Image (cartoon, rainbow, N blue to C red):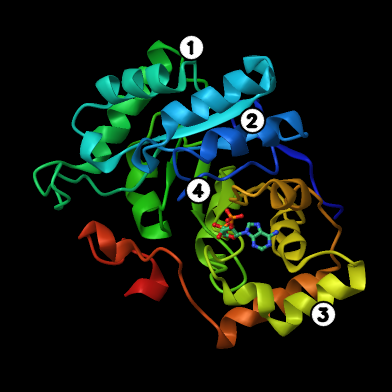
């Protein structure tokens, strides 16, 4: 199939395929990156309360001059805020200086205390129920809700009781972490996948991988374009390349069509070079049901 430029969520809303990622984008840099991206064709920005850059992302949006309704904006509920989602939502809206979110995600199914320990006395399923309540009561403020870092095992527990099927599951996805099981599961349930760390994060070996560079040479693009385009060539996928560098932000928006054989070759990389840029064990809840983290 030709690469997509947008996908439709289970709410009916349209989400642009490529968004600017801001994990590890520092205050002082991120507002300029967001402004530059929005002035140069991006219409999708992803942030999170946990990235501690929502205020600057909001400033970048304002500085771009782009009307709010032309932007798809996602933020995430931080792990230490799982006991009081409503308060956290208001704080995010205030920092982003926006009346509404296009998408709000539970960042991890991992409630934590303020000092970074697992909060064993709170169940993430109760957090989801509150997120549902907020979405159902205020759809104009919270256009869609979803999850992040959810494995099949965790989805099975969630979907048994969910009144709202998550619109999105945002997970680490790249050729060294293809996660076929949860991808297929979400596609079957109508849940859009959003790929974070599509380049493999900082200093990624994928940018030098010989399969990636071979395909990049064929299409006369950078390795990053191959890695980003991989997701745009799959149904129900969006992708969040992160950069604070103007020329890379411009470059990363260029999507190419890949053949099924090239997609297969990229997937084969995982057989010999598997890695995660962000292992779920940092939360204190082990592998969170991901088969490669057991
Ligand atoms: P920077 O933000 O300094 O430009 P990911 O999207 O997988 O999280 O990867 C982000 C990392 O990849 C950052 O270190 C970012 O650097 C770098 N990066 C972003 N775009 C490109 C590109 N086109 N070529 C090489 N590195 C890139």
Q: Report how far apart the C-alphas of labels 3 and 2 lie in the structure.
A: 33 Å
Q: Which label lies toward us, 4 or 2?
A: 2
Q: Secondary structure at mark 3?
A: helix
Q: Which residue is mark 1?
A: 99
Determine crowd level at label 4: few under 14, some 14-19, many 20+ residues with C-alpha closer than 10 A. many
**Residue at (54% x, 51% y) in the render:** 186
Relative image position of residue 14 (x, y in whole percent): 69, 29
Determine if residue 163 is in view.
yes
Relative image position of residue 222 (x, y in whole percent): 79, 65
Q: Which residue is mark 3?
A: 214
Quadrant (top left, top right, bottom left, bottom right) of the N terminus: bottom right
Q: Report how far apart the C-alphas of labels 4 and 2 lie in the structure.
A: 23 Å
In primary-sequence order, the first of circles 1 and 2 is: 2
Q: Which label lies toward us, 3 or 2?
A: 2
In primary-sequence order, the first of circles 4 and 2 is: 2
Q: Which residue is mark 4?
A: 170
Q: Secondary structure at mark 1?
A: loop
Q: Which residue is mark 2?
A: 35
Asked whether disc 4 touches disc 2, contact meaning CB atoms under 8 Å apart, the reply is: no
């Amino acid at each position: 199939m030709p690469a997509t430029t947008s996908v439709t969520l289970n709410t009916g809303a349209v989400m642009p395929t490529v968004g600017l990622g801001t994990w590890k984008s520092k205050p002082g840099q991120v507002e300029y990156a967001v402004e530059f991206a929005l002035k140069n064709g991006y219409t999708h920005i992803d942030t999170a309360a946990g990235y501690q850059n929502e205020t600057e992302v909001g400033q970048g949006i304002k500085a771009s001059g782009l009307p709010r309704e032309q932007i798809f904006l996602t933020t995430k509920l931080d792990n230490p805020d799982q006991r009081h989602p409503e308060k956290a939502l208001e704080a995010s809206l205030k920092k982003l200086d926006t009346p509404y979110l296009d998408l709000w995600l539970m960042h991890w199914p991992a409630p934590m205390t303020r000092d970074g320990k697992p909060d064993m006395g709170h169940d993430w399923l109760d957090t989801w129920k509150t997120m549902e309540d907020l979405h159902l009561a205020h759809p104009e403020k919270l256009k869609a809700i979803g999850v992040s870092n959810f494995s099949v095992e965790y989805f099975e527990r969630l979907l048994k009781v969910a009144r709202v099927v998550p619109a999105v599951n945002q997970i680490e996805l790249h050729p060294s972490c293809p996660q076929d099981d949860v991808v297929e599961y979400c596609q079957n349930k109508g849940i859009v996948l959003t790929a974070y760390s599509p380049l493999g994060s900082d200093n990624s070996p994928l940018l030098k991988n010989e399969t990636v560079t071979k395909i990049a040479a064929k299409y006369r693009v950078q390795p990053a374009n191959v890695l980003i385009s991989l997701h745009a060539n799959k149904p129900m996928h969006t992708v969040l390349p992160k950069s604070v560098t103007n020329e890379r932000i411009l470059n990363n928006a260029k999507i190419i069509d890949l053949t099924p054989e090239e997609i297969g070759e990229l997937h084969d990389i995982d057989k010999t070079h598997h890695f995660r840029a962000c292992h779920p064990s940092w939360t204190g809840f082990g592998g969170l049901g991901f088969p490669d983290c057991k």
